[in-house]
């Protein structure tokens, strides 16, 4: 049926916010519990979103709205690509476009906080993007394909042959979800602040809601990519994704914020180093693997 | 539209401005975030950005100078919004009420919705006041003509700031 991919994409794009919102609520609840607080209910992020959408529209300029929407669009498109089994490289590019939209939105206003946040967002992109690219290369070396649809039917789980890449990916998830110690560009759902609100300083009301929604899509996408590491069964994939999320939340709660230079050094030395070792190893001995 | 009302009541983010005084009230406001009082269980979050906030918490006695800043911050908040004045300093000026440089109370500068008396008020009283303000947000009009309403009610942000009026 020709409509099948469209239906799948539509279904995923409708369900992903529900899942993303619940996961965010779970994050906030668990974080509160780790800090010996009662914490908000699980549906809290939905109340936040509905409230934001019904606040007065207050914008600094029109371009800002465009970039917020572009961010949502690109991230949602990247998620649809994952759901439809498209090319992993294409997915990375789409995701990077989304991040760049957010950065441009941050630069489009005159608030210095927003601009600082945008600059730090670029640093984050610089830190994690090479690791993601090496991850895709490693997946190709192991499975012989860049297509998600091929990767998921690969008969063996990827994690045993990509253990170091997986560690690198954990780092990517923590940076990408803007969790401590890498909540440099902005900090989400925390009473503590980073440069007022960093890149989100001049977004308010419905536009902040759009960005929040994009974050939910991003969360589902990142966990979906984590699931690729054990894609032999749906439950195993979900288990790996959940473990990655729990690890990110734990790291968030036990660490303090670092500087962007520290992040860049760590991501390139540790993250990129591990990923590169894994890729070289796969390149030299990968052919003989079962 | 009841879901909008529900969401507004369940997710008020507050912005706290200390206009300058003994800081007793301000410290108690910070205490609201601690595990003992934990405001987040009501969905109430602290934000350092007036553009993200629904509630403005004012502590301390409002001077003519800080009143200008206060009014500016108030106008940066997108509606619907509510203001909670905390501590007798913010209510009437308190023990500083006859100082030459002070406005007697935050409500001389911006409209105040909830008054929480005390020097300093108990954190429980503050929570009570904040939840009252959240109740007020819940009652804010949801209809489309809200924007028209806002334009009628609020002067543009640029106009605020003459010291004589503060
Ligand atoms: S009301 Fe009392 S505790 Fe609060 S700021 Fe004034 S003097 Fe300090």
Image: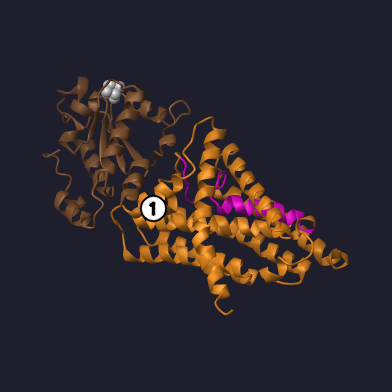
Chain colours: A orange, B brown
Q: Tell me if A219 is positioned left or right of B60 in this view.
A: right
Viewer-nearest residue: A264 or A5: A5
Seen as rendered, the residue at the extreme right is A288
- In this view, the residue farthest toward the front is A1
Q: Is residue B82 above or below residue B63?
A: below
User: Which quadrant contains ligand 1?
Assistant: top left
Quadrant of the frame with the C terminus of chain A: bottom right
Question: Residue under circle 1?
Answer: A112
Q: Residues within 10 Å of mark 1 (few under 14, many from 20)?
A: some
The outermost residue toward the bottom is A2
**Number of labelled discs?**
1
* SS at badge 1: helix
| The one of B24 and A17 positioned closer to us in this rendering | A17
Direction from residue B81 to residue A221 in the image, left or right: right
Pick whichever, B160 or A98, lies toward us: A98
* Chain letter belonging to callout 1: A
Q: Where does residue A84 sit, x and y in percent of width and height? A: 60, 70
Magenta stretch contains residue B65? no
Q: Check if residue A172 falls in the magenta segment.
A: yes
Examine the rendering and report whether any part of residue A184 can be seen: no
Q: How far across and how far down the image is residue A244, in percent?
A: 65, 49
Question: Left of B152 or right of it: where is B124?
Answer: right
Range of magenta residues: A161-190
Pick the residue in front: B102 or A290: A290
Q: Quadrant of the N terminus of chain A?
A: bottom right
Task: Determine the residue positioned at 50% across, 67% down.
Answer: A74
């Amino acid at each position: 049926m020709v409509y099948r991919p469209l239906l799948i994409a539509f279904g995923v794009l409708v369900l992903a916010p529900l899942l993303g919102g619940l996961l965010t609520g779970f994050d906030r609840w668990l974080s509160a519990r780790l800090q010996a607080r009662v914490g908000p209910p699980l549906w809290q992020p939905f109340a936040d979103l509905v409230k934001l959408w019904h606040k007065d529209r207050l914008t600094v300029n029109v371009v800002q709205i465009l970039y917020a929407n572009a961010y949502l669009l690109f991230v949602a498109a990247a998620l649809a690509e994952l759901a439809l089994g498209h090319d992993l490289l294409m997915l990375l590019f789409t995701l990077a476009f989304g991040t760049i939209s957010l950065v441009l939105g941050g630069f489009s206003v005159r608030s210095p906080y927003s601009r600082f946040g945008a600059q730090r967002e670029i640093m984050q992109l610089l830190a994690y993007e090479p690791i993601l690219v090496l991850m895709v290369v490693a997946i190709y070396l192991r499975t012989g394909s860049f297509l998600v649809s091929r990767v998921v039917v690969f008969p063996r789980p990827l994690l045993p042959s990509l253990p170091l890449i997986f560690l690198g990916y954990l780092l990517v998830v923590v940076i990408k979800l803007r969790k401590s110690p890498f909540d440099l560009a902005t900090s989400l759902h925390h009473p503590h602040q980073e440069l007022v609100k960093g890149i989100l300083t001049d977004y308010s009301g419905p536009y902040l809601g759009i960005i929040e929604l994009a974050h939910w899509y991003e969360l589902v996408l990142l966990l979906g990519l984590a699931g690729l590491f054990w894609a032999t069964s749906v439950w195993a994939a979900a288990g790996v994704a959940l473990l990655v999320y729990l690890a990110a939340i734990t790291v968030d709660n036990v660490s303090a914020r670092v500087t962007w230079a520290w992040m860049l050094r760590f991501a390139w030395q540790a993250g990129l180093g591990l990923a590169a070792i894994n890729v070289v190893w796969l390149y030299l001995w990968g052919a003989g693997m079962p | 539209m009841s879901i909008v009302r529900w969401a507004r009541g369940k997710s008020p983010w507050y912005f706290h401005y200390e206009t300058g005084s003994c800081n007793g009230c301000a410290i108690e406001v910070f205490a609201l975030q601690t595990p003992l009082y934990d405001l987040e269980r009501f969905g109430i979050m602290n934000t350092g950005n007036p553009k993200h906030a629904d509630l403005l918490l004012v502590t301390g006695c409002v001077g003519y100078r800080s009143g200008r800043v206060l009014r500016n911050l108030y106008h940066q908040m997108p509606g619907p919004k509510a203001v909670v004045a905390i501590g007798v300093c913010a209510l009437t000026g308190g023990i500083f009420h006859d100082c030459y440089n002070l406005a007697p109370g935050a409500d001389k500068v911006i409209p105040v919705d909830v008054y929480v008396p005390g020097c300093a008020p108990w954190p429980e009283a503050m929570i009570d006041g904040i939840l009252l303000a959240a109740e007020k947000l819940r009652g804010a009009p949801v209809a489309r003509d809200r924007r028209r309403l806002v334009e009628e009610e609020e002067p543009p942000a640029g106009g605020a700031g003459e010291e004589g009026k503060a």
